[in-house]
Image (tube, helix red, strand yellow):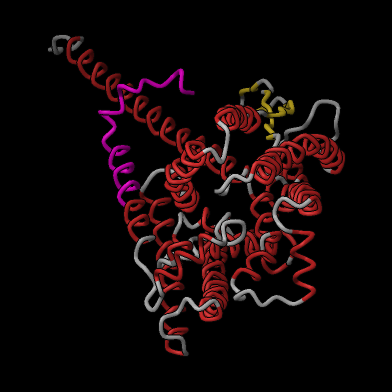
Amino acid sequence: MAANVSWSAFGKATELRQRIFFTVGLLIVYRLGTYIPIPGIDGLALRQFMEDAQSGIGGILSMFTGGALSRMGIFALGIMPYISASIVMQLLGSMWEPLKNLKKEGEQGRRKLNQYTRYGTVALATAQAYGLAVSLEAGGLASDPGMFFRIACMVTIVGGTMFLMWLGEQITARGIGNGISLIIFVGIIAEIPAAMAQFLSQGRSGAISPLVIVGIIIMVIAVLTFVVFMERSLRKIHIQYPRQQRGMKVYDGSTSHLPIKVNPAGVIPAIFASALLLLPTTISTFSGGSTSPIMSTVLAYFGPGQPLYLIFFGGMIIFFTYFYTREVAFKTEDVAENLKNQNGFVPGIRPGKKTQDYLDYVVTRILVLGSGYLALVALMPEIIRAQLSIPFYFGGTSILIIVSVGMDTIQQIQSHLVAHQYEGLIEKSQLRGKRGSNKRKGPSRR
C-alpha cells in the first residue's frame, strides 16, 4: 500500500493531521501521569526496593505500565486490568451462551459487552490496587501505613486505570490507531532509552564485553526483521462465488481469497503466559521477603531463566495460541457459515461442515508455525538475558508489541492518505465535468 501513497499529500490531509495531533496530545498526558506519585509513598525506600526487584515486578509489569509501577505513579497498574477484562469477556463470549446472544444483537449488544468490560475493569483494578497497597505496607514503603493509606492508594490507582481506559477509547474514536495498544506501545518505547543507557554503562564499566553488546544489538535487529516478516505472512485460501442473475442481467462468478495470518492470535498468548509465570515472583517481591517453603520451592524452579520456567513458558504460549485463535481470533465455524450465506465456497470443498473441517485442517497446520514462532521470539531473549546477566528487562513480548502496534498504526495512516487522495480525485473530476458542461452549452432553440 505504501507504494501507492503519495506522502506529499500529508500536508493537505487536514483531518489526518488533526487526528495525529490529538493522539500525540493524549499520549503526552499519559506520560506526564506516570510521574505523579501515589500519596504516602516513601520515595527513597521505593527506589532501593525497585532496584532489587528487576527480575520480577520490575520487569514485564513495569514495561507494560511505562515505568509508572517502578515509580508508583497514579498509573501504577497501567491499562492491564482493562486488557485482562477484555480478554476474559472475549473468551466468555465465545463459550457462554448469554454473551454469545449479546454478540449477535449488533451495535446494542456490543455496547452492553463494553459496559460489562468496564465493570470487570473496575473489579480487577480494585482487587489489584488493594493487593498493591497491602504489599507496599508489608514492604515498608508506606510512610504512614494504615487503613487511610490503603483507601487513598486504592482510590488513586483505580481512578488512574479508569482514566487511562477513557484515554484509550478517545484515541480510538477521535485519533489514529488503537488507543489501548498505543498506550502500551508508548510505555515500552519510553523505557528503551534508559534501559539502553544502563546497558551501555555496563559495557563501559567492563561488566559486559563490547562483543556481547554488538552481538545483542545485531540480534535485536534480526529479531525485529523476523517478526515483521512473520506478522505480514499470510496463507491465502481461494474462494469462488457462483454466477448470479439480477433481473435480466447475468453476472459472471467472481473469485477472491480468504487471508489467514500465520499468527492470528497476535501477542495475546505471550502476554497471558508472561503474566501467569511472573505471578509467583511478583507475590514474593511484595511479601517483604517472608515466603513460605512452598513458595520458595516454586521460585527456585520457576524463577525467570530457570529451565522449568522456560519449558512452561513455551508450552503455555503454544497452548494459548491455539486456544485464543480457535475461540476468539479465527472461529472456523463462523467463517464457514458466513461463506455459505454469501454463496461462496472453496473449490473442491462442499459448503458448510466440509468447509469448516477444511479450515480447521489449514489453521491447525498454520498454527504449528505460528505458535513456534511466538515461542521462539519470546524465549530467546529470556535465555540470553539469563545467561549474560543483562541488568534490564529484555523480552520478546515487548518486541512483538512494538512491531504489531507500529505496523497497524502505519497502515491506518496510509489508509487515511489513500482515502484523502481518492476524495481529491473525485472533486477534481466533478469540477472538470462542470467546466466541460459549461463549454459545451449550445445556443438555445427558438
Q: Is residue 65 above or below residue 262?
A: below
Left or right: residue 388 compared with residue 118: right
Q: Residue at x 65, y 70 (%)?
A: 284
Q: Residue at x 55, y 65 (%)?
A: 81
Residue 44 in view: yes
Q: Residue at x 42, y 47 (%)?
A: 190
Q: Quadrant of residue 10?
A: top left
Left or right: residue 70 compared with residue 13: right
Which image quarter holds the C terminus?
top left
Q: How many marks?
A: 0
Q: Is residue 240 above or below residue 143?
A: above
The image position of residue 11, as x and y in percent, is 26, 28
Inspect the magenta stretch and tell me whether residue 94 lies in it: no
The image position of residue 343, as x and y in percent, is 72, 35
Name the residue furthest bottom. 147
Q: Is residue 81 above or below residue 361?
A: below
Name the residue furthest front. 206
Residue 333 in view: no
Nearest the eye: 204 or 346:
204
Q: Please, what is the dominant secondary structure of the magenta stretch? A: helix
Q: Is residue 395 above or below residue 407?
A: below
Range drawn in magenta: 1-25
The image position of residue 154, as x and y in percent, is 47, 78
Q: Residue at x 34, y 65 (%)?
A: 36
The image position of residue 179, as x and y in percent, is 44, 51
Inspect the magenta stretch and tell me whether residue 12 lies in it: yes
Left or right: residue 382 compared with residue 62: right
